[in-house]
């Protein structure tokens, strides 16, 4: 048993955690190839992965917007609903 403890020869210093200031929603992961894609490029490419060509689901409004010229679509009778749900 020793009366005095020797100090450690080397000490470890942990570096501080680096925090990035990247806002959420700028990047997304492809469902097929798991590659990181810049979301603006993905939307410009009509929701098709530029790496593997995987198509993502588009809503009806997004598809109409991609097919027609800006400002040329005029929706008529948008309040009409079906009486029979089947």
Image (cartoon, rainbow, N blue to C red):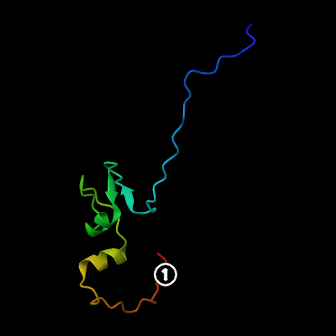
Residue 13 image point, x, y percent: 54, 35
Instruction: Look at 27% across and 58% down and name the residue there.
Output: 49
Q: Secondary structure at mark 1?
A: loop
Instruction: Look at 65% across and 17% down and name the residue there.
Output: 6
Whether 55 is drawn above or below 80: the answer is above
Whether 62 is drawn above or below 70: the answer is above
Residue 63 image point, x, y percent: 30, 74
Q: Nearer the viewer, residue 9 or 86?
A: 9
Q: Quadrant of residue 66?
A: bottom left
Whether 86 is drawn above or below 53: the answer is below
Residue found farthest to the top: 1
Q: Nearer the viewer, residue 59 or 86?
A: 59
Q: Quadrant of residue 8?
A: top right
Q: Tell me the crowding category of disc 1: few under 14, some 14 to 19, or many 20 or more residues within 10 angstroms, Cα based.
A: few
Residue 23 image point, x, y percent: 45, 63
Number of marks: 1
Q: Quadrant of residue 68?
A: bottom left
Q: Quadrant of the N terminus?
A: top right
| Residue on which disc 1 sits | 84
Residue 82 image point, x, y percent: 46, 84
Instruction: Look at 27% across and 61% down and name the residue there.
Output: 48
Q: Nearer the viewer, residue 41 or 71?
A: 41
Whether 70 is drawn above or below 31: the answer is below
Instruction: Look at 48% across and 49% down and name the residue there.
Output: 18
In the figure, is residue 9 to the left or right of 74?
right
């Amino acid at each position: 048993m020793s009366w005095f403890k020797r100090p450690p020869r080397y000490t470890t210093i942990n570096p501080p955690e680096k925090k990035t200031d990247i806002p959420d929603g700028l990047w997304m992961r492809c469902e097929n190839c798991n590659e990181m894609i810049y979301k603006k490029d993905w939307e410009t490419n009509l929701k098709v992965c530029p790496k593997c060509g995987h198509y993502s689901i588009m809503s009806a409004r997004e598809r109409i917007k991609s097919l027609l010229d800006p400002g040329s679509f005029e929706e008529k009778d948008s309040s009409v609903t079906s009486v029979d749900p089947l």
